Image: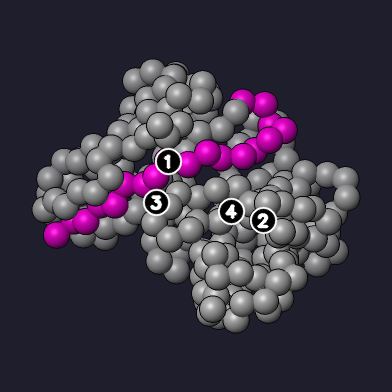
Amino acid sequence: DADVTQTPRNRITKTGKRIMLECSQTKGHDRMYWYRQDPGLGLRLIYYSFDVKDINKGEISDGYSVSRQAQAKFSLSLESAIPNQTALYFCATSVTGGRTGELFFGEGSRLTVL
Amino acid sequence: AQSVSQHNHHVILSEAASLELGCNYSYGGTVNLFWYVQYPGQHLQLLLKYFSGDPLVKGIKGFEAEFIKSKFSFNLRKPSVQWSDTAEYFCAVKVANFGNEKLTFGTGTRLTIIP
């Protein structure tokens, strides 16, 4: 089983619909992140959370919200989806404590907004 | 804020050719540097990382990268590529401050290896 699990893996929706992408991890990491990947743009940070009570905006948070329900769960919501939110979304985790900096990624959630 | 540039968007090589992918970052302070790889249909995986010490770091699958501070560069190299190296490669940088775990990624380089 994957250490970082994302659901759904693929989703097609319509403009204006509310969408939630979920992420759960079994790595015991405190820190969790949501990135989106677009061709030619690489990965851009949407939101990140360093613990259950800590939520921070990334570089492209407009149109998104997150919820850290537990240490192991971090969900991303699109309140009213629009076509330019069509992308591949990745959840990632990392260990607290600076030395490693390594991110562990989920398999990705491909979202298409029509 | 820091930024990362990967000027090679798509590289096509034959098997056994040597590889060098460029990565430059902009930040005047101490950084940690990473290369991630994304094989087709898979999630990103860490290839190698630099924190301190020897500026030549070795990673998995025969890859290595050299940190040249004066050039703000962290280029990825492999002496002889294989078809299985076909993937997208991302360079990333992190400001080396405790509590700052955010990675900034480059736009990626797609590598295609021709058998």
Determine the CA span between mark 3 and mark 2: 27 Å
Q: Amino acid at mark 4?
A: Tyr
Mark 4 Cα shell of 10 Å, populated few (<14), some (14-19), many (≥20): many
Residue, disc 3: A36
Based on the picture, tell me whether residue B35 belongs to the magenta stretch: no
**Vertical comparison of A66 with A82: above or below:** above
| Residue type, label 3 | Arg
Mark in front: 3 vs 4 = 4
Reading the image, the residue beneath label 1 is A106
Of A55 and B23, which appears nearest the observer?
A: B23
Q: CA distance from mark 1 to mark 2?
A: 21 Å
Query: SS at mark 2?
Result: helix
Q: Quadrant of residue B85?
A: bottom right
Q: Please identify, in this view, whether the residue under mark 2 or under mark 4 is nearer the observer.
A: 2
Callout 1 amino acid:
Gly
Q: Are marks 2 and 4 in contact (CB under 8 Å)?
A: no
Foreground: A56 or B81? B81
**Quadrant where the image shows the C terminus of chain A:** bottom left
| One can see residue A25 in this view | yes
Mark 1 to mark 4 CA distance (whole Å) = 14 Å
The chain to which mark 1 is attached is A
Up/down of A71 relative to A67, above or below: above
- Residues beneath discs 1 and 4 located on the same chain: no
At a point 62% along the width and 39% down the height, the residue shown is A102
